[in-house]
Amino acid sequence: MRLRHTVDFLLYDWLNVTRLTERERFADHSRDTFDAVLDTCERIARDKYAPFNRTVDVEEPAFDGEKVILPACTQDAHDAYVQSGMLSAAQDADIGGMQLPYTVEAAANAFFACASVSIGGGMLTVGNANLLMKHGSVLQKEVFALNEFNGRFSGTMCLSEPQAGSSLSDVATRATPDGEDHAQDPLGPRYRLKGNKMWISTGDHELSENIIHLVLAKIPGPDGKTIAGTKGISLFIVPKKLVDTHGQLTGERNDVALAGLNHKLGWRGTVNTLLNFGEGKYPVRGGAGAIGYLVGEQGKGLQCMFHMMNEARIGVGLAATMLGLAGYYASLDYAQTRTQGRPVGPAGKDPAQAPVRLIEHADIKRMLLAQKAYGEGALALGLYGAQLVDELHTGTPEQQHQAQWLLEVLTPIIKSWPSEWCLEANSLAIQIHGGYGYTRDFPVEQYWRDQRLNMIHEGTHGIQAMDLLGRKVLLEKGMGLQLLGERMQATMARAHTDETKAYAHALNHAWSEVLQATHAAWQGADPALSLANAVPYMQAFGHTVLAWVWLELHLASTGTEAAHVGRRQACQFFYHYELPKMGAWLKVVSSRDATCAEMPEDAF
């Protein structure tokens, strides 16, 4: 119930999401329909996900040489999720969707991530289908995307390779035209793919009828050579099982082979694979290579894939957030029941007194407040980002313009900030449990293990930081920074009490420092040195954004009930304990500190 109360506050009291029902696309909705969706997802998460979070951690996916074996609870949870209609929640009603705002969809999916992020929902399938709805042909949408939305098919994204993780310029998978008539295939220009893809989540399983892989590959020219860099990358639909133009399985297995499972620190219930495309294990239609269909234009694959990657980054940020909150709730319950130690009075500790509960100790409150500030702040940020997506799709031209540029600068923060600071929250949850915290008797050790993957998922921390400082804040002469600053100023203008005025002053100073550091970082001819401290820059940028979010939440928490008091106290914690950290981070950015860049390799 704690999570539901927080979600309701953020959606209705802060974001006022019911205003979206005034728009034509959402006119059939109301708070009642939004609540019904939240109720359904909360119930399924409670009944089908939460009881089996430890099960899927212990009973990891297994490969018998032909298929992946998963515990029965995973199939049950998958089926319940499909039946809920959440795969098509945001889609048009005439194709079976609910036409829900993405803000409500994201909030509803939060219940599943909190209950068991490892079992998962439909993030990759929905992202895959959304990409095809944006960039695919009419038939590709009908055959592949619609069958993903209805749950018959699942979807993946296949970017990384064993020799090339984040460096997509080095993609080695090749796609060659499949016959002289390859361009006439109704499902799209037909190619044969050969290569290997690594770290493919949900890359193989039996949960659905088919798996639709979206694969990045390069098409060689007449001379057999490919275009260097990312400009030569194209995008292909490569189904695990071949289908006809009506979306029915033909009975032919495509040449996509599961080479092995990756056994991970966390998210153990989620299948993660090495896939071989075109190795010959499943020869198909008398040719060599896996059959794939070109999506969009040749050489424009990465631009198409970013549509899915950006969705996935918001999804990873929300998953990280919910793991942080799951640990917070568990450690709060523990601190409220476990007795340990005695209070310190004027004469010191009195051993004759009965032990007190953990939560009566100030340091335990510090750790709980930190978790609350990180988790609830990150959830607010994630839902704010989701609302920007709604603005981008259904707002006025001016709202769409602002949403586009705000998402450019905020997406790296929405993904990376929860991944780092909710990991710290999970660490604090273990600390509160003491020795029990690192045993499997309590769930917090699993939350930490699951969480640790998120700083790598969908673009590592360093990649997000370089994207932010090296590209996003510079686009259109800093348009995103300008719009974000304007929104912060509007919030500060609403701060009228002595307390909130002090926060507004601190926020204004922090934002000025971020702008100064942004400018200072690029005062030199060496871009490598400019980006050498991109991660500290992103940390400071993220903390400033979260300070703004917490001031917003403080201003919306005007009542005297405990939940409002708690949010105001969490805001105070963030401004007193967290925001001051940014000075050290920005110092190395502004001075273009070369300590790390100039460290000689042999000195390590």
Image (tube, helix red, strand yellow):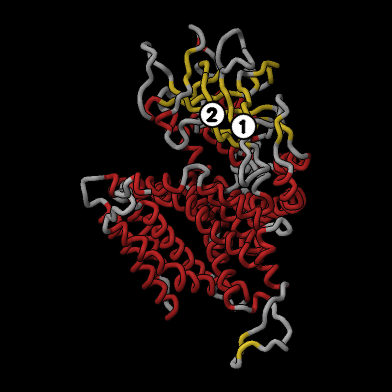
Q: Is residue 396 above or below residue 370?
A: above
Residue 386: horizontal and vertical position, in percent? 52, 51
Q: Is residue 329 above or below residue 277?
A: below
Please state which amino acid type lies under the numbered disc 1: Gly
Marks 1,2: beta carbons within 8 A: yes
| Residue placed under numbered mark 2 in the picture | 197
Whichever of callouts 1 and 2 sits on the residue coming sooner in the sequence is 2
**Quadrant in the picture for residue 11:** bottom right
Q: Which of 166/319 is in front?
A: 166
Residue ID at (71%, 24%): 66
| Residue placed under numbered mark 1 in the picture | 203
Please state which amino acid type lies under the numbered disc 2: Lys
Residue ID at (65%, 30%): 204
Q: Which of 237/441 is in front?
A: 441
Residue ID at (62%, 76%): 561
Q: Is residue 556 above or below residue 423?
A: below
Q: Secondary structure at mark 2?
A: strand
